[in-house]
Image (cartoon, rainbow, N blue to C red):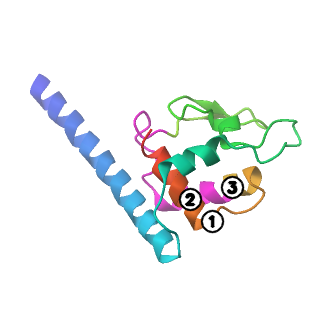
């Protein structure tokens, strides 16, 4: 019984890790094909904590405003109060596994936070940072 539970847990972990690796690899290759240079996790971290102005709610427009600076923690949307599950793949195996989902949230969050769409370089730097968490 213990062996089958352990095997099932290991198998599930492998599936999630494979989905994560495939989505990330696909996106990073796509971004480089669109002109991005080598991606830098430190640049992603800098963007994560950088302020891009003040929202109508009087809060700083930073990724960390809603998601927290520790990507392993649960965040909270500043307008709606909705809980945001951790972005770190190390604690949330669903993160970075679906290309369409990643692109959808980049579009929404970059426009709100930066006031524009993120460049392919910024997206790749963000992903490089997030996947290390």
Which element carries disc 2, helix, strand or loop? helix
Q: Quadrant of residue 70?
A: top right
Q: Are marks 2 and 3 in contact (CB under 8 Å)?
A: no
Residue drawn 47% across the image and 76% down it: 33
Task: Looking at the image, tell me whether mark 3 or mark 1 is earlier in sequence order.
Answer: 3
Residue farthest to the top?
2
Mark 2 and mark 1: Cα distance apart in space? 6 Å
Residue 93, percent from left and from top: 40, 40
Q: Is residue 54 left or right of residue 93?
A: right
Residue 119 got which mark? 1
Q: Give the range drawn in magenta.
A: 88-108
Q: Nearer the viewer, residue 41 or 88?
A: 41
Residue 89 got which mark? none
Which element carries disc 3, helix, strand or loop? helix
Identify the residue position indicated by label 2 in the image. 123
Q: Residues within 10 Å of mark 1 (few under 14, many from 20)?
A: some
Residue drawn 23% across the image and 34% down it: 9
Identify the residue position indicated by label 3 in the image. 110
């Amino acid at each position: 019984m213990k062996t089958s539970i352990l095997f099932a847990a290991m198998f599930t972990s492998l599936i999630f890790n494979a989905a994560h690796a495939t989505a990330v690899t696909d996106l990073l290759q796509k971004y480089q094909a669109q002109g991005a240079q080598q991606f830098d996790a430190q640049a992603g971290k800098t963007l994560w904590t950088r302020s891009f102005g003040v929202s109508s709610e009087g809060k700083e427009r930073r990724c960390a405003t809603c998601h927290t600076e520790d990507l392993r923690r649960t965040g909270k949307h500043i307008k709606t109060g909705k809980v945001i599950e951790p972005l770190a793949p190390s604690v949330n195996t669903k993160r970075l596994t679906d290309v369409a989902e990643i692109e959808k949230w980049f579009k929404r969050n970059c426009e709100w936070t930066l006031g524009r769409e993120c460049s392919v370089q910024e997206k790749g730097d963000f992903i490089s940072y997030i996947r290390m968490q």
